[in-house]
Amino acid sequence: MGSGKDIRDVLQGAGIAIDDVVSAALELYVPHPGVETRSKAEEVFRRELDLALSDPNLCLLIYGAVLLEEEGRRGNLPNMRSSDYERDLTYLIADEVIGITIAKYVGGYKGTFDYVRYDKAKPGILGQLGPFMDDAVAGLIGGVSANMYTRAVFD
């Protein structure tokens, strides 16, 4: 890794602990070959998460969502009123695009389907995050979960 920040530290600074991401992911855990138990699922999910977060492109996508969230809270998003940001209006789809992009980048089409599950259910910390971060983290969880279920079979 370079001399820059680690995305885990950036997320922590935004109030998002990796343990909270893992906990949210495991709320929708379903036993599957290779991850028959919750403890095995957590082990494999953490391994897949570490692998995903080693990719600078993914980290930059997540960082973009962090910055959008910060600017939204400050009322600085272009062409958007603060009240619109606060309500996460249905016409705001940039957040969904970020979540889908992250999920598909990490886990392909399977990741996209898992993103939708997490985005709708909003387990754990996802229900507490703003409009950009809930989708970015749901995308991360969706992509990593898809990889967990797919690759766990081969462990």
Image: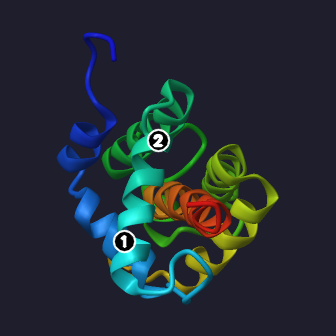
* Label 2: how many Cα within 10 Å (few below 14, some 14–19, many 20+): few
Query: What residue appears at the point 63 percent right and 47 percent down from the top-left corner?
Result: 106
Amino acid type of disc 2?
Leu
Q: CA distance from mark 1 to mark 2?
A: 14 Å
Query: What residue appears at the point 55 percent right and 61 percent down from the top-left corner?
Result: 155
Can residue 129 be seen here? The reply is no
| Secondary element type, mark 1 | helix
The reply to whether callout 1 and callout 2 are in contact (CB within 8 Å) is: no
* Label 1: how many Cα within 10 Å (few below 14, some 14–19, many 20+): some
Q: Nearer the viewer, residue 100 or 84?
A: 100
User: As drawn, is 57 to the left or to the right of 137?
Assistant: right
Quadrant in the picture for residue 79: top right
Residue that label 1 marks: 42
Reply above or below: 50 against 127.
above
Amino acid type of disc 1?
Glu
- The residue furthest top is 3
Q: Earlier in the sequence, mark 1 or mark 2?
A: 1
The label shown at residue 51 is: 2
Can residue 62 be seen here? The reply is yes
Reply above or below: 31 against 84.
below
Query: What residue appears at the point 61 percent right and 84 percent down from the top-left corner?
Result: 32
- The residue furthest front is 155
User: As drawn, is 75 to the left or to the right of 151?
Assistant: left
Q: Nearer the viewer, residue 144 or 148?
A: 148
| Secondary element type, mark 2 | helix
Residue 96: percent from the left, percent from the top? 66, 59
Residue 138: percent from the left, percent from the top? 52, 65
